[in-house]
Amino acid sequence: MSETDESSKLVSGPREYLTFRLDQEEYGIDILKVQEIRGYEKPTRIANAPEFIKGVVNLRGTIVPIIDMRLKFSCAQAEYNSFTVVIILNLRNRIVGIVVDSVSDVMELAPENLKAAPDIDGSIDSSAVVGLGSVGERMLILLDIEKLMSGVDMGLVSVEA
Amino acid sequence: MTEGHQEAGGGDSFDLSQFYQIFFEEAGENLDLMEQMLLNLNLETADDEELNGIFRCAHSVKGGAATFGFADVAELTHQMESLLDRLRRHELQPNPMMVDVLLESADASRVLLARHQTGETSEPPSNADLVRRISELAAGGTPIPAAAPVAAPELAAPVQAPPAVPVPAPATVAAKPGSRQLEIRMGPLDRPDQVDGVKDLFRDIVGLGSVTEVASDRADTRVFHASTSSSNEDLLDLFAFHVSREQVNIREMDTAATSWSDRDDPPPGAPVAPAPGFGFFEGAPGVPNGAASAPVEATEARPAAAKAGATKPAPSQVTAQPEAATIRVAISKVDQLINLVGELVITQAMLAQNSQALDPAANQQLMAGLADLDRNTRDLQESVMSIRMIPMSIVFSRFPRMLRDLASKLGKKVEFVTQGEATELDKGLVEKITDPLTHLVRNSCDHGIEMPGDRLAAGKPETGTITLSAAHQGGSIVIEVRDDGRGLSREKILNKARERGLDVSDQMSDGDVWQLIFAPGFSTAEVVTDVSGRGVGMDVVKKNIAALNGTVEIDSSEGYGMRVSVRLPLTLAIMDGMSVGVGDEVYILPLSSVVESFQVKDDAVNTVAQGSRLVKVRDEYMPVIELEKVFQVPRYDASKSSDIMVVVEAEGSRVALLVDELLGQQQVVVKNLETNYRKVPNVSGATILGDGKVALILDTSTLVRRSRH
């Protein structure tokens, strides 16, 4: 069901995206996947986890893993200061927090402002990039955050033996 | 359930009564549900789902009733089931008559159940007529020819219920089929006028018969002559509104006036009327008439009936359902409650920690409030946890019967002793521990206890004893299965292990040898006896118990018996933990697996090949696991180092964990890491500390296993 949602994203009416910055780039994710935005607090480290998994935090009694997108996307630097924010995502009954440099705003994008994504050779699965959006001078990289997070390389989901 | 059908009170020491209550509750629910579904059933468009649902209800009641030996209920529901079975197979088309009969039967079952529940021993109401009607319908009588035979019993079965029949006879009540002439004496009475209502009863209840008062020889006693077709039992039930049963004396008068009147086909069941409470309402004025709809509407008509019979007390007294002392609640709701209380405990701990820095004198009220909160939270937590706790007797009580059957099959003499049945355990655990325990008990009987002759030859009493005990030990429950049989043979186990190519030596400790029987494919039958093993192997037992965070230990002495101890956490949701510090991080150890802790001296640690280390604790060498290395804890402060050993035991082996410091003991709410993340090696879960931080709970059994490689 969510699959049809994603594929219809480019053709249906305007949708709202939460935009955030990682280094110099600006990304957008479907606002409906966002549960809340919090300040960064030091998570409990998990041994032998990939570097970008910072650990787990207590979100009102729920244990939530925290992923630093800057490390995942190989950004030049990943500082933790009072502006660092965590976007708590609710993806298919899983709750995951992602660390970003800053949250910009929520914007509505009409289908005509969306362009199909070119083939990107980067540190992420290019199929998780659903398109590029242009807002004035700015370019938004629209992510299918659910696909990105459920990818095997994220190490969030146990690979069944 | 290994033991299928049981008689009520069958086994000598086997007590089924504790299950009765559950059965009554369930049966009541099933009957209610069935009634509801029947009432909602659309006859033309009845779909399979609905019919199957109704069938299942009847089937459940029947199964339970048969198990508990309530033959009358089982018989009635069996008939209902047969009819419903044909309906759901579409061999019959449902018609209103069937719905009526089924509803009546449901009511009758309820009455029967209530009788069993209150332990009434008097003559039960006969349902022979209902049964006959159901079977006629089930035999496939088409609605029109069936109308006559059905209508007739409808008159007769609830004898006092002519309004429900197309033959209205309210005026000619005097001579009913099978009427009897009775003399009813009531007394001694405190107030003789209290039984005036009896006359009203006969007047109001159409079909009950007629009554005249005759002079009494005593002032406190009143005498009536009645002509009625109702049974004494029914009359007593009716009179109960006015006068207690003991005060009523019914005597049949010696007259030949019994008039087999207008009907020449009195149904066999007629003289004995069924279902007192039920018939009562059928017959009450104000119940809408009409043969087909009467029983359907009877339920709704109850309040009306009560109103109409103004002299009669509320109808609830008639059926006198014992008030439910328990409620059935979805487990998910209880779990949610437990989760919320868990959060509360965490918040409370957080408050307590933050308030420690405050000046007690300046914040006296706040401190007092916090102390109250602390106590209340603890009480609340205990109460909530106790909802899920059920006594072990639920598990234990299934064994006597099973053992008796097994022992007689094997030709052995076994006495079964249970201890600590009142020990409580989490419901989820109880369900999961039953199968492994069953296996252990069977094993004891099958392989442990010798044949009576062998026992006598060995100088033991002829009858073997199997003891099942449960007790609390710290944060866990220990369940033991003991027998005084032949015990395990070390030699045979070692030989068997060698055959299987397992790595064993004669120098192994007994404990290690016994652990071998948990190896997959290592059947105890092959090892100890020639009797073939049955069911799951010991490896499955061990796996199941390990899945519950439990451990199994074996203690055996050849020729004298063996003991299997199963140690389980009391609940899966909360456990006692010991928090240890490594670097800047905090980890939780299950307190149940912690044996001891001590400050290590340099000379006590020996390094063996490949850098693995052993520590000598008293006379035992055990492997050292450095948590700092296992969890790659970053060390910022080089001046500190791990110099405290915590000895933990799991799966029968011990290892020493090297940590920086011991932080304390506390109850922790176990949280699943896999809900949002995934399984983490060496970690069984996570918990939230008083400061809101997450701490990982170590999985001692994987740590111990790790040290073996």
Image: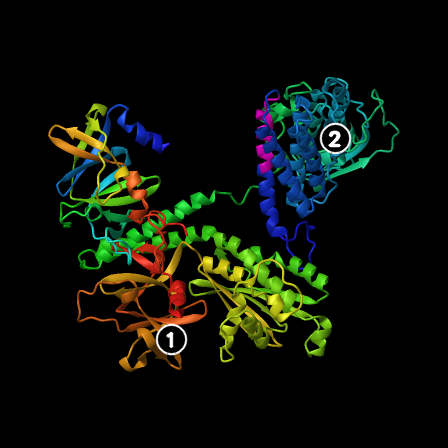
Residue B611, image x, y percentages: 30, 74
Q: How is the image coloured?
A: rainbow
Q: Secondary structure at mark 2?
A: helix
Residue situated in front as seen by the camera: A19 or A85: A19
Q: Which residue is mark 2?
A: B135
Query: Quick one: SS at disc 1?
Result: strand
B435 left or right of B76 in image: left
Magenta stretch containing residue B551, yes or no? no
Q: Which residue is mark 1?
A: B622
Q: Is residue B46 above or below residue B411?
A: above
Is residue B34 one of those drawn in magenta? yes
Tag 2 and tag 1, C-beta contact below 8 Å: no
How crowded is the residue under tag 1: few (<14 C-alpha within 10 Å), some, or many (20+)? some
Q: Which residue is painted at 47% across and 51% down in the image?
A: B388
| Highlighted range, magenta | B30-43
Quarter of the rendering occupied by the C terminus of chain B? bottom left
* Image point (63%, 72%), residue name: B485
- Disc 1: host chain: B
Q: Quadrant of residue B170?
A: top right
* Type of the residue with mark 1: Met
Residue B448 seen in this snapshot: yes
Relative to the observer, which residue lies in front, A128 or B388? A128
- Residue B621, image x and y in percent? 38, 78
Q: Residue furthest left?
A: A137
Q: Position of residue B312 (x, y in %)?
A: 63, 29
- Left or right: residue A89 compared with residue B53: left
The local crowd at label 2, few if under 14, some if 14 to 19, many if 20 or more residues have their Cα within 10 Å, is some
Among the 4 quarters of the image, the one containing residue B406: bottom right
B116 w.r.t. B97: above or below: below
- Foreground mark, 2 or 1? 1
Closer to the chain start, of discs 2 and 1, is: 2
